[in-house]
Image: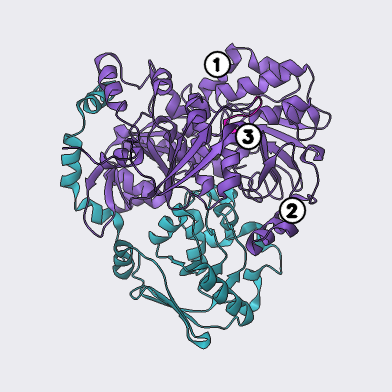
Chain colours: A purple, B cyan
Amino acid sequence: MTDQPRTLVEKVWDRHVVRSTEGEPDLLYIDLHLIHEVTSPQAFDGLRLTGRGVRRPDLTVATEDHNVPTADIDKPIADPISRKQVETLRANTEEFGIVNFPMGDPGQGIVHVMAPEQGRTLPGMTVVCGDSHTATHGAFGAIAFGIGTSEVEHVLATQTLPQSRPKTLAINVEGTLREGATAKDIILAVLGVLGTSGGMGYIAEYRGSAIEALSMEGRMTVCNMSIELGAKAGLIAPDETTFEYLRGREHAPAGELWDAAVADWKTLYTDEGATFDSEITLDASKIEPHVSWGTNPGQVVPVSGRVPDPAAMDDPAERTAAERALAYMDLEPGQAMTDVKVDTVFIGSCTNSRIEDLRAAAEVIRSSGSGVAEGVRTFVVPGSFAVKTQAESEGLDEVFTGAGFDWREPGCSMCLAMNPDKLSPGERSASTSNRNFEGRQGRGGRTHLVSPAVAAASALAGHFATPEDL
Amino acid sequence: MEPVQIISGTAVPLDRSDVDTDQIIPSDWLKRVERTGFEAGLFGEWRDDRDFVLNKQEHAGANILIAGPQFGTGSSREHAVWALHQYGFRAVISPRFGDIFRNNATKNGLVPVQLSAAGGRTLMDAVLNDPTLEIVIDVELRTVEAQAIDFLESFPLEDSIQHRFLNGLDDIALTLQHADDIGEYEAHRPDWVKELEIQHNAR
Ligand code: SF4
């Protein structure tokens, strides 16, 4: 008997169905539940109110990331409300027997950075977290998606979630990336094509030779921004690159288990002849370094490009949104992006704060030999303690500080500005994070999304620039 | 949550697309560990503007929010739903919702009403024209009606979600009825997965 060809998404989905009934969503088993201080307190309260326990504390892992300061972490958190939230996480994880990585701990970091680097995220898993960038873990061939606090409570109590099977979308990126273009530029280019709603209702599978050529760090960057497409999740089939990354990591299988696991993981690919509900293809050789100009991540142009003219847009809704965005961003149609000055540069966030990202930024600084431009404020925030330690052992911190960059402690930092790292009203940033929403990095702040290389080059130039422009 | 069947009342017209959850409730509000009191933070960055639609006298007491497409995209923060619900909204109408927002809404008795792009536009214009326009949302029939302008459109709502709305059911209690199935599933995981869990728990 031959099985029907299935996509990767279908294979991973099918192996997690606890219960399937006509007219109801499937009940999906969750292999890994990541929690942090911001979206979990009300869920634990819910458990206490109903007298329910945590079904699988051993499959639940907590870290402190959203709120934590990136300086003076040996002192108590100055903001009393942030401090209370972090203390609440500590008390809740203690009460329910869940491992937590507190601020300053060697295992601490942004949830989507620390879990993969500890070898907790594995191919074929289902991973959830009360955070929309959970899709990051899809880089390993896992179905990983963000959930709300009620769902966090649901997973804590049952280790499952009722979920309707989403449609599948293939995003093929074929060919070789040109010099200077990175994984971040791939996903920004995809956003430029699909917009912020092109992925709604889908789980995306990124495929093609340009995706296969990416490192795990690069794959995580791509999958991370699946939510910006509106997709529920995004994933990439595991291959030798994945296995090499995982081999020897603390929580990955070892010895005989490793062989059994790899044999299993090798079955995780989209079968020949399987069909997707939708499909797009991009030519990697045409992808230039990108920058966003607006207030949603679909509003992007190449760094060599110009601010678009809303008057030239056919769709009235798109035109109105663009006009609003340009007013908020204080940009003129037709302005060259390289003429736009930056006030602040942020290198960090779960999109681009891994070791490879820091190496790329440091390389730009090293080869230019110059320092941060006059008046530009900078934040280099490693994604985790492990990244920070690794970077310091490679001397990257000295490259940054030597050029005048501010080297910080790990956390989400200026990605969402819940801690003291914020933009002031009207301040303009080049950010390696994932959201350029109004006020995201501080009230009235103006965010432009870029890759680590473009962020570093822009810090040195004082305006948007690619390393080639220096 | 409380059962929800019929929502009737007037609507606040938020005529913008891509209203993400960062706009619905800014991140400063996410530091709180409580589950109530979020209404004060609703649309925090826009509320200071006296001309912001929520501040207009003619919309006082409205219990429906009608917005442009891509409402509630972005961050997973359920605080966005709590803020809308605690402010007094019982339904949000939009041609398209962010996935996680829509899920969160259904767990808190806030009905996500997804209309066609044309239907959403028609109703938005009608509300902009007449803030007193009476709108009726029927969860059982899955319809939105504004009799005064002869508007009637149905909206999608999965059977299981509709059932929870109509009966005010707790999702977790429903799943716990299948605790045996979950145990059964756990017992039949691949050997290497079970082994890995045992090793992990032994540490
Ligand atoms: S870095 Fe930003 S996007 Fe990532 S988890 Fe933290 S706040 Fe969310």
Mark 2: few/some/many CA within 10 Å (<14, 14-19, 20+) = many
Q: Which residue is mark 1?
A: A390
Q: Which residue is mark 2?
A: A326
Q: Main secondary structure of the magenta part?
A: loop
Are the residues flagged by discs 3 and 2 from a single subunit? yes
Horizontal placement of A119 versus A193: left or right?
A: left
Determine the CA span between mark 1 and mark 3: 33 Å
Mark 3 or 2, nearer chain start: 3
Badge 1 amino acid:
Gln
Query: Please, is residue A120 above or below residue B4 in the view?
Result: above
Query: Please, is residue B82 above or below residue A288 in the view?
Result: below
Q: Quadrant of residue A139?
A: top left
Determine the CA span between mark 3 and mark 2: 26 Å
Horizontal placement of A176 versus A340: left or right?
A: left
Quarter of the image where ligand 1 sits: top right
Q: Secondary structure at mark 3?
A: helix
Badge 2 amino acid:
Leu
Chain hosting mark 1: A
Q: Secondary structure at mark 2?
A: helix
Query: Is residue A420 in view from this perspective?
Result: yes
Residue A183 belongs to the span the image colors magenta: yes
Mark 1 or 3, nearer chain start: 3
Residue B92 belongs to the span the image colors magenta: no
What is the quadrant of the N terminus of chain A in the image? top left
Q: Nearer the viewer, residue B16 or B61?
A: B16
Which numbered disc covers residue A286?
3
Magenta residues span A179-184
What is the quadrant of the C terminus of chain A in the image? top right
Residue occupying the point 78% across, 49% down? A331
Picture coordinates of residue B192, whole percent (x, y) = 23, 24
